Amino acid sequence: EDPVFVSAPSKSLLCPICQDTFREAIITRWVSFTTVIDFILISFYFFDFFFCDIFLNFFIDDSECGHTFCKGCLNRALENTDNPQCPLCRCTVDPTQTHPNLVVNAVIGELPVHCGYKNYGCEIVVPYSDLVAHMSSCAYHPVQCPHHSFGCAWKGAANELNAHITHRCVFEQLKEYLHKTEQQISHFKHTIEQQSQEINKLKRSLQEVSVH
């Protein structure tokens, strides 16, 4: 599911192929590790300037084909071809020499996003890099009623489940009866299966007698 950013990401952070925010940004040529580290350290002091479109373009696009794409997008574009080329400029690309764009991934990781369970009531905003960890323990993650197998269609936030079962779920009042009925049906099915097996045995016995 796509993240819901608090504000639209810079166009410099959109993959040229899928036109969506980079997922595992990968660059077609190596950017020196020293350059990346220098950028990250300096950006802490000049965040607004260094994360603007003009500066980001240095790490995303230059004349020597340092183009950046989603990892999956680039891999699909380069597979099944004897002459792998950059999807933008058609420069030759060596798939073994591509590298993660650490700067772009770091920038995207710090973008504020809404919890994926916002529609269920969660108002938390976290950095994109923390989204998965937050959602794994979010009190608003959606759950089904434990009686859904009996027909209850309720689905809502986990922290509302107890109130639903206690005050609103009609199946909770009928659960003892429903469980007994379910057991009886299971017993009937087992009995029918046994009788079916006995009937098949009798049919085979009759066929053997008719042959002789």
Image: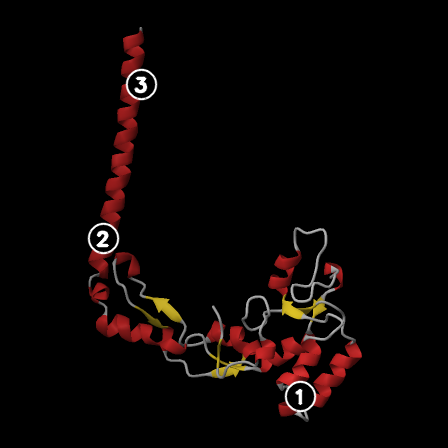
Q: Name the residue under label 1.
A: 50
Instruction: State the residue position of label 2.
Output: 180
Q: What residue type is labelled 2?
A: Lys
Compared to 163, does 172 lie above or below?
A: above
Say which amino acid is labelled 3. Answer: Arg
> Considering the image in quadrants, where does the C terminus appear?
top left
Left or right: 5 as drawn, with respect to 202: right
Residue drawn at x 49%, y 84% is 7
Describe residue 70's horizontal placement relative to residue 64 as left or right.
left
Task: Where is residue 89? Give x, y as percent.
Answer: 69, 66
**Location of residue 171 (image quadrant):** bottom left
Tell me: residue 210, above or below residue 67.
Answer: above
Where is 56 relative to 75, above or below? Answer: below
Q: Nearer the viewer, mark 2 or mark 3?
A: 3
Q: How far apart are marks 3 and 1 (CA)?
A: 83 Å
Identify which residue, 109 or 87, lies in the foreground.
Answer: 87
Q: Is 202 left or right of 138, judged from the image as shown?
A: left
What amino acid is at disc 1? Answer: Phe
Q: Which mark is residue 204?
A: 3
Pick whichever of labels 2 and 1 is earlier in the sequence.
Answer: 1
